[in-house]
Image (spheres, rainbow, N blue to C red):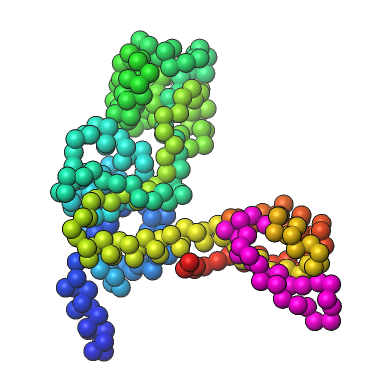
Amino acid sequence: MTATTQNQQSAMLESPRLKIAIQKSGRLTEKSLDLLERCGLSFARSKDELFCYGRNMPVDLLLVRDDDIPGFLAEGICDVGLVGDNVALERACQQPQEAGQSGATPQRIRGLGYGKCRLSIALPAQAAYAQPADLNGKTLATSYPGLLREFLQRHRVSARLVYLSGSVEIAPRLGTADGICDLVSSGATLAANRLREVETLLESEAALYQRDLSGEGPKQALLDRLLQRLDSVLKVSESKYVMLHAPVEKLQAIGDILPAAESPTILPLAGTDQRVAVHTLCRENVLWEHLEQLKAIGATAILVFPVEKMLA
């Protein structure tokens, strides 16, 4: 080990360490780990695989139950959490007065664009429904009593809630509830149980939440550095670098076709002054339909490349 490496490791041990909590197993785990890896973080796992020590930055990882993450943030056990909005907001509904060490509840700072779903009320397919008032007197099964209760109170609906921790969708078939309030992704599970969505309470995705780091300058500086990397990763997830040859008179049309394109680099082509090479960055996904439109106006040699890293 070189003296430089030893000094770097000593500095990491002495500096404040940012603690990030993520779901230890479930639908968000793999993508959360991949996101942190693409941000350049490398971890060494403990034997029980519940704690990961940051190798190249003073950032450690806690692998926990997803519904524990909001509480860990509030209690100051971790500094940052990657968790679904549905989990964070349900916790806030159930314990609205809970606060972290600094007296502030966890703050949402970034949506991450994956783990998308919605929290919806669903009734049997044949049940009549026109408005929330039609839920009066009904029994609703749910794993999200806080968010459901808030919705019912907002619409002045009186309904009985039954809490179920799983398999909520079978409650109407078992006769234990008239309807349900549960997470929906594709809707296939509802269809299989002859249920239909009648209300959407929440559009949810994986998001980054933090506790209040006021007065903890070094930790906030670490988080700001991580957020800069994170923003770069999120920007390139859909971004594409496009190269093509095109008639000079079609440059404006090309700009109109390509989605969210930056100002292009225009290069002359050898042997002609009628066509040029166009290089540009598109900050949204480039579809086959875009390529077909480009070809229709005379573009050739169209190449689309993924962007691995981008720092604005």
Q: What's the magenta region? A: 258-283
Residue found at x 75% / y 57%: 253
Depth check, front residue: 260 or 72: 260
Q: Is residue 72 visible?
A: yes
Depth check, front residue: 250 or 27: 250
Say if 28 sits above or below 44 in the image: above
Q: Among all residues in the image, which is located at the extreme bottom?
A: 2
Say if 163 sits above or below 296 in the image: above
Left/right of residue 162 with respect to residue 192 in the rendered view: left
Residue found at x 22% / y 74%: 12
Residue 60 in percent (x, y) is at: 25, 63
Residue found at x 76% / y 54%: 293
Q: Is residue 143 visible?
A: no
Q: Is residue 279 magenta?
A: yes
Left/right of residue 206 with respect to residue 125 in the rendered view: left
Quadrant where the N terminus sits is: bottom left
Say if 58 sits above or below 155 in the image: below
Residue 222 in percent (x, y) is at: 28, 65
